Image (spheres, rainbow, N blue to C red):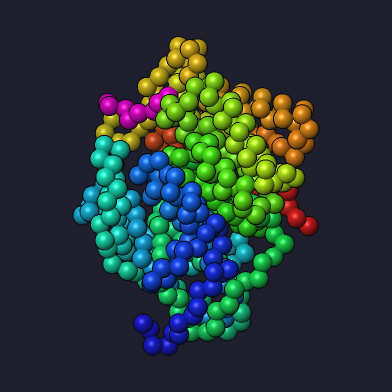
Amino acid sequence: MTNSLRPMTIEHDMIRGAVEIEATERGLIPHRLPRWARRQIPDRFMIQTSAESAGVRLAIRTAADAIELDVQARRIAADADSPLPPSAYELTEGAELVATATVPIGSRYLFTFERPDGEIAPGPDATARFAGLGTGTERDLELWLPYYDAVELLELRADAPITTIPESRALRWLHHGSSISHGYRADTTTGTWPAVAALRAGAHLTNLAFSGNAMLDPFTARTIRDAPADLITLKTGINIVCGDAMRLRAFLPALDGFVDTVRDGHPDTPIVLVSPIWCQPVEASAGPTMQDPDRAEEWSIAAGNEDDVAAGKLSLQVVRAATASIADRRRADGDHRLHYLDGLSLYGESDAAAMPLPDNLHPGPDVQRLIGERFADRVLADFAIS
């Protein structure tokens, strides 16, 4: 411990972007699914990705010049020994990034799709340190945890008192999506498109995007049903296509049922159904996606084809049309707080020509920022609370 820094209590209401906070013997773990839902997770990959800290942050008010946060973090890895880049913890003030702390990797969750063991290789605690922050004047900061790590918060220290930022009247935005919304391939958490959008629009984000697992799971719908929100956005379809998890016959009632469940807890809350962004391999062909065997680098291709789509499998074109049709029907039936956004308006074919996806599936940092800026301007701005 740095001598000039004093321990500060991490209050539960200091943690934003989590739906449940678990007290452990050592500290606090923010969760993006409640315990009952975590017990229903059907595979080891989702156990880790749902535990990761996408959008989770500490909202603090302080005049501190130096802040330290001790953590025990866990990241998915193929093995226990290969080098991994450090984790990035970020401080923002308003929409501005004011400091970044890089932290060595701690524990590892050993997983590949070829060897889905899910074993934990324990690693050391680490400290995110921010220095040279203050002028002696109190300021409101948010400390963002890395979106790719599951983090246990152990101790917070500073050279001036830290309190919780009171809740404001800003838009409480809850988003559910896939790895694209989780942030896969973004450089840091504040570079993931939901964080970009939230910071740009001044919204309070709860990001319930689970890499590989936007599968219209009932436990996710019930979690959203029970969570406070002024705006709910549901970006679904690409995981279902890329995993070849449903046919059109199953997708239609599954999406309807998901919205029904969310509506049970949010009868008047605006809900926006967002269809997938452009992804060339499965635009017209069916999934699943697979690694191109002729390339050493990550490059996704479709294992299905257009004949499979004609037989009832899903492509992104089919999913967009089906999602739009459900939104239209439900609005005609009286749900005027339900909206539809074509994902191609966030990233379409012409964007792909100018800013291609680095693995033919996931947006890189440039496209993550583009999507976030467009979403803030085209969606969040329409629902801002005055």
Q: Position of residue 200 (x, y in %)?
A: 63, 54
Count of residue discs: 0
In the image, which residues are magenta?
A: 287-294
Give residue 345's position: percent from left, percent from top.
62, 34
Identify whether 299 is placed above or below 379: above
Q: Going by the picture, which residue comes out furthest to the bottom?
A: 3
Establish if 211 lies above or below 356.
Answer: below
Q: 115 above or below 293?
A: below
Compared across the picture, whether 200 is left or right of 50 comes to: right
**Quick one: 298 or 266, which is closer to the camera?**
266
Identity of the residue drawn at 38% across and 72% down: 26
Residue 199 within the segment the image draws in magenta: no
**What secondary structure is the magenta-colored segment mainly?**
loop
Write the residue at 41% across / 65% down. 152
Residue 283 visible within the image: no
Q: Position of residue 204 (x, y in %)?
A: 63, 58
| As drawn, 8 above or below 148 | below
Q: Quadrant of residue 349?
A: top right
Q: Indicate the quadrant containing the N terminus: top left, top right, bottom left or bottom right.
A: bottom left
Q: Where, by quadrant of the figure, is residue 72 drawn?
A: bottom left
Residue drawn where x is 62% and y is 28% of the image: 323
Is 111 left, or right, of 329 in this rendering?
left
Q: Quadrant of the C terminus?
A: bottom right
Q: Taking the image as drawn, is residue 142 in sight?
A: yes
Tell which of 327 and 183 is nearer to you: 327
Measuring from the top left, give residue 35's x and y in whole percent: 47, 54
Residue pictured at 37% horizontal, 22% vertical: 303
